[in-house]
Image (tube, rainbow, N blue to C red):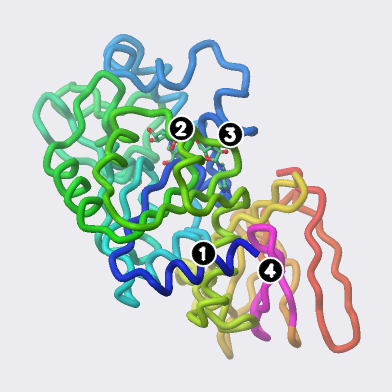
Amino acid sequence: MSYRELAAIIEKSNRLVFFGGAGVSTECGIPDFRGQEGLYNRPSQYPPEEILSHTFFERHPDIFYDFLRENLLKYRVSPNKGHRALAELERMGKLTAVITQNIDNLHQVAGSQNVLELHGTLSRFYCPCCAEKFTLDWVNSRNGVPKCHCGGVVRPDIVLYEEPLDDRIWQAAMQALAEADTLIVAGTSLTVYPATGLLRCFKGDRVVIINRDETGFDQSADLVIRQPFGKTMMKTMIELGAWQPGVTMVAPELDGFVFHPSFPGIEICPVLAEEQGWGIRSQLAKIHPGAEIPPHTHEGVEVFSIIQGSAQVLIDGDWIQANPGTALVASPGTTHAVRNSGKEDVLLFANFSC
Ligand code: CNA
């Protein structure tokens, strides 16, 4: 099995470098460009690369922001098991750098320290006229094109097409690759340059490609895995003995809880669950002892079920174990069926229509 081979490769490695792209985050619900459900396969007046170009931003900031809000900014998602596995491999002293073409900041949220963002990040914005900095929350709180107090059009701190990459990050990526013994490439079509050209700097022993579709580099890889990245990494971490199946395995998945602003003792975790094409946006909440349970509907949130016994919850297409006291919190319009089997509460999500 391919994840066994991957685990064996990781075991032998001491300076692993990861090079990833948009496919790393599709299991979180963020679409890629060229994958089967990618933005290139959706009807649009302009191709994504044209909209995300410097010229287009200058000429049509309104269309640029509509695209950004619709396709990239609306997702408030948690990292998936793949992001978390990479952070864990870094903590274990195996992985030295994550080089990413992504702009979603999810590697950092998962806990990776050395992240080289070749194309910048959507977590920072600035005014090109006066250099004033803005946060993503600030941009999200505005409608349409966000304007600075000086009148400038605020832009994301990403590298738009036609713009040069950051030389400091490029040099660091070259060095990390030159010193690496193993390279894992995942979730990238390897068609975007100059980023893909960086791979020439790798002089190590082993190359692994984890990608749903074929890439032009598959033939030079030692191992090619055509499986979803997050699931592959989860199985690999279990194979390595770094994660345990069951409750402890899913513990990292339940990171990111924040206390509900109105209900003391209740923590909410935004997650995106998906199975067989049903998109299900839902939230998990931890109910602490003595917490006041919200009324059935509050501020657009409904509490459906509080797990009494041992239960499994569907997140990212995987059934995971949830602790007693965990509640499923879902937006109005979502329906789900609850199936009880003996002492176990099994929550089955269905028919998302939010
Ligand atoms: P791409 O050209 O869209 O290719 C993505 C590749 O990932 C495809 O070959 C898919 O088959 C593959 N893939 C999709 N899902 C999975 C999965 N779960 N497991 C394994 N493989 C999968 O994307 P690239 O990153 O190669 O192109 C570079 C562009 C896309 C960069 O400039 C990014 O900034 C840009 N982008 C980033 C994001 C993001 O930050 N999340 C989203 C969309 C686009």
Q: CA distance from mark 3 to mark 2?
A: 20 Å
| x 58%, y 46%: residue | 29
Lower sequence index among marks 1 and 4 = 1
Q: Are marks 3 and 4 in contact (CB under 8 Å)?
A: no
Amino acid, disc 2: Arg
Above or below, 54 relative to 333: above
| Residue 222, position as x, y percentages in the image | 48, 53
Lower sequence index among marks 2 and 1 = 1
What residue sits right under mark 3 in the picture?
35
Q: Which residues are magenta?
A: 311-327
| Nearest-to-viewer mark from 3 and 1 | 1
What residue sits right under mark 2 in the picture?
69
| Front-lying residue, 219 or 303 | 219
| x 88%, y 72%: residue | 339
What residue sits right under mark 4 in the picture?
328
Question: Quick one: label 4, few (<14), some, or many (20+) residues within 10 Å?
Answer: many
| Residue 264, position as x, y percentages in the image | 49, 78
